[in-house]
Amino acid sequence: MSILVTGSTGTIGSQVLNQLIGSGVEVRGLTRSPNKAQFPAGVIAVAGDLADVDSFRAALEGVSTLFLLVPNVADELTQAMQALTVASEVGVKGIVYLSVYNGDTYADVPHFASKNTVERMIEALDLPATVLRPAYFIQNDLRQKDPLLNAGIYGMPVGDKGISMVDIRDIGEAAALELLRRERAPAPLPRETYALVGPDVLSGADVANIWSDALARQIRYAGNDTAALEKRMKTMMPAWHALDLRLMLDRYQNDGAAATSEDIARLTHLLGHAPRSYRNFAKDAAAQWLSR
């Protein structure tokens, strides 16, 4: 039997694969292009696409545990619900689903609402799943390199309320631990839910101050103009996607996304160490940028 990782060529899927290597369990990566996939040694490339139900059903042959990551696409909800249906029908005994933090409260953010609906399906059908709810990814801010170095600004309008950003390495580690726990269990395990969060609640100004320390220069927060960000993003992605992300940032500004002490304690217990901090990420990133 084996673990199948969807989203295997992306940022989070790659982290999950790296954490599973050396576990003694067969690991497969779902990809539309098996011949081009550059997986770690030992990972088996399997042809398939979540948007193609028949190909996904074929990819599940011999799979006992599934990591389900559905990309932020227009039909995300349909892909996720169909994938869970097929996985249940073929007898997959364990699922780890990548949802989102605050998906149950950000009702006007499309990809949050989609993931919350998938969670409702998991609960209604009593699927043997672990739901992981990551907050804003710390490593998203690697895209801030040019504004930080060239203009001295932190340009992501995350707002003033504060959010508990999570390191993608903690996401990959948490997912792998739950996949292996379910894979090694003799029978399907009860449902679990974890918030994947960082140890600090950070506003835009807080992040700018962290970068000021890391880069040893004054960094200012560019402010809360999400409309301008949406306009810029539409030059790089479909308009619906840019609006979706703007709505997310609007909710961050209005409500924040602060983890509770219980969230952090449960994640710390799962990982076996405290969640990684934004400050350490910024220090490492700055060292790499400035050494080139």
Image (spheres, rainbow, N blue to C red):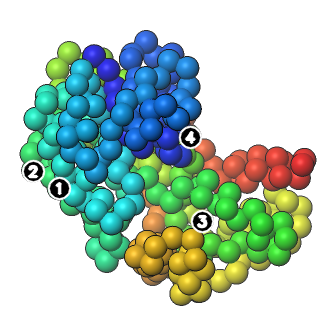
Q: Where is residue 209 shown, x and y percent of the image?
A: 75, 68
Q: CA distance from mark 2 to mark 3?
A: 35 Å
Residue 84 in sight: no
Q: Where is residue 121 shown, x and y percent of the image?
A: 15, 52
Q: CA distance from mark 2 to mark 4?
A: 31 Å
> Which residue is pictured at 53% across the width and 87% down the height?
227
Relative vertical location of residue 237 with respect to residue 127 in this rendering, above or below: below
- Label 4 crowding class (10 Å Cα cut-off): few <14, some 14-19, many 20+? many
Q: Which residue is mark 2?
A: 124
Q: Which residue is mark 4?
A: 169
Q: CA distance from mark 3 to mark 4?
A: 19 Å
Q: Amino acid at mark 2?
A: Ala
Relative vertical location of residue 169 with respect to residue 185 in this rendering, above or below: below
Q: Earlier in the sequence, mark 3 or mark 1?
A: 1
Q: Earlier in the sequence, mark 3 or mark 4?
A: 4
Q: How many marks?
A: 4
Q: Amino acid at mark 3?
A: Leu
Q: Which residue is mark 3?
A: 202
Dot label at residue 274: none
Residue 65's image quarter? top left
Q: CA distance from mark 1 to mark 2?
A: 6 Å
- Label 2 crowding class (10 Å Cα cut-off): few <14, some 14-19, many 20+? few
Please tell me whether mark 3 sits on a helix, a strand or a loop.
Answer: loop
